[in-house]
């Protein structure tokens, strides 16, 4: 768990964020808190404990922003919304999955993953949660000091990146991941790979300094430039 920049925290304790399932980030505007993604199910109490340890109170969480509908990102959403009464923000194209009107579809390939997913059925299960604010590409919201939405479909139909303007920080969900360098996300769980690559090229047209991934350590310098270099090689 560590500070990414002032008022932006990564709540995972491991480089790959596997202790929570995926990257869970907390942003403070000095008064209210916003959470970005929620990890696997049964992580709500770990997340709350880590927020307390930062000297902050989870009761100040007003918004929970979801980058996309996968179980490692929305698993603890129902529990955290229940505890905090925060408003849930997600892209409109992922709303049916989050609200339980469409099933979690992946993995898409290969067949082997299907049997693994079957074995992990309980972990991958998600409870339906109502989305309070359904957003679209280009939307700007007065949340966490001001965020803008960049719709980056492909990994899921409603995958989105969140840009925190004041800090130059971009949260990319599973549009890309990181080991040492930027890499593609899990293709087995990506719905439309050509569309995913188009979205990576779209994001490469934006400027940002710091990139926070769903899987992998934050990239703290020159992330926008490194994203452009990655997109060119696709
Ligand atoms: Zn993920
Ligand atoms: Zn994902």
Image (tube, rainbow, N blue to C red):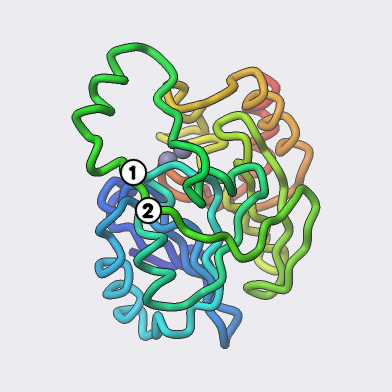
The residue lying at 31 percent from left, 41 percent from top is: 124
Does residue 10 appear to the left or right of 89 in the view shown? left
Residue 206: % across, % down: 76, 44
Does residue 106 appear to the left or right of 233 in the view shown? left
The residue lying at 55 percent from left, 49 percent from top is: 67
Count of marks, rendered view: 2
Whether residue 6 is visible to the viewer of this picture, yes or no, is: no
Question: Which element type, helix, strand or loop, lies under badge 2?
Answer: loop
Residue 193, quarter of picture: top right
Pointer 2 local density, CA inside 10 Å: few below 14, some 14–19, many at least 20: some
Residue 20: % across, % down: 30, 53
Q: Which residue is mark 1?
A: 16
Whether residue 65 is visible to the viewer of this picture, yes or no, is: yes
Residue 109: % across, % down: 41, 15
Q: Is residue 152 above or below residue 126?
A: above
Q: Nearer the viewer, residue 25 or 152?
A: 152
Task: Kindly identify which numbered label has been placed on residue 127.
Answer: 2
Residue 194: % across, % down: 65, 18
The residue lying at 47 percent from left, 77 percent from top is: 85
Pointer 1 local density, CA inside 10 Å: few below 14, some 14–19, many at least 20: some
State if disc 1 and disc 2 touch (CB < 8 Å): no
Note whether ligand 2 is within 8 Å of mark 2.
no
Q: Which quadrant of the figure contains the C terminus?
A: top right
Q: Is residue 157 above or below residue 39?
A: above
Residue 148, quarter of picture: bottom right
The Cα atoms of the two marked residues, 2 and 1, are separated by 25 Å
Q: Nearer the viewer, residue 122 or 218?
A: 122
Give the foreground label among 2 and 1: 2
Q: Earlier in the sequence, mark 2 or mark 1?
A: 1
Q: Is residue 103 above or below residue 115?
A: below
State ligand 1's quadrant. Answer: top left
């Amino acid at each position: 768990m560590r500070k990414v920049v002032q008022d932006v925290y990564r709540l995972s304790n491991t480089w790959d964020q596997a202790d929570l399932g995926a990257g869970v980030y907390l942003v403070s505007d000095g008064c209210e808190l916003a959470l970005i993604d929620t990890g696997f199910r049964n992580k709500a109490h770990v997340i709350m404990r880590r927020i307390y340890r930062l000297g902050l109170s989870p009761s100040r969480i007003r918004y929970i922003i979801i980058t996309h509908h996968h179980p490692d990102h929305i698993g603890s959403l129902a529990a955290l919304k229940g505890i905090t009464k925060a408003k849930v923000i997600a892209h409109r194209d992922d709303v049916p999955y989050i609200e339980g009107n469409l099933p979690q579809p992946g993995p898409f390939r290969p067949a082997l993953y299907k049997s693994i997913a079957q074995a992990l059925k309980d972990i991958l299960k998600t409870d339906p949660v109502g989305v309070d604010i359904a957003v679209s590409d280009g939307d700007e919201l007065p949340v966490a000091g001001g965020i803008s939405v960049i719709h980056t479909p492909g990994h899921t139909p409603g995958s989105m990146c969140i840009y925190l303007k004041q800090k130059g920080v971009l949260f990319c969900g599973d549009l890309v991941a990181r080991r040492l360098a930027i890499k593609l996300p899990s293709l087995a769980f990506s719905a439309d790979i050509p569309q995913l690559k188009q979205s990576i090229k779209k994001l490469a047209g934006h400027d940002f300094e710091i990139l926070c991934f769903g899987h992998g350590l934050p990239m703290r310098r020159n992330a926008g430039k490194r994203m452009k270099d990655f997109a060119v090689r696709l």
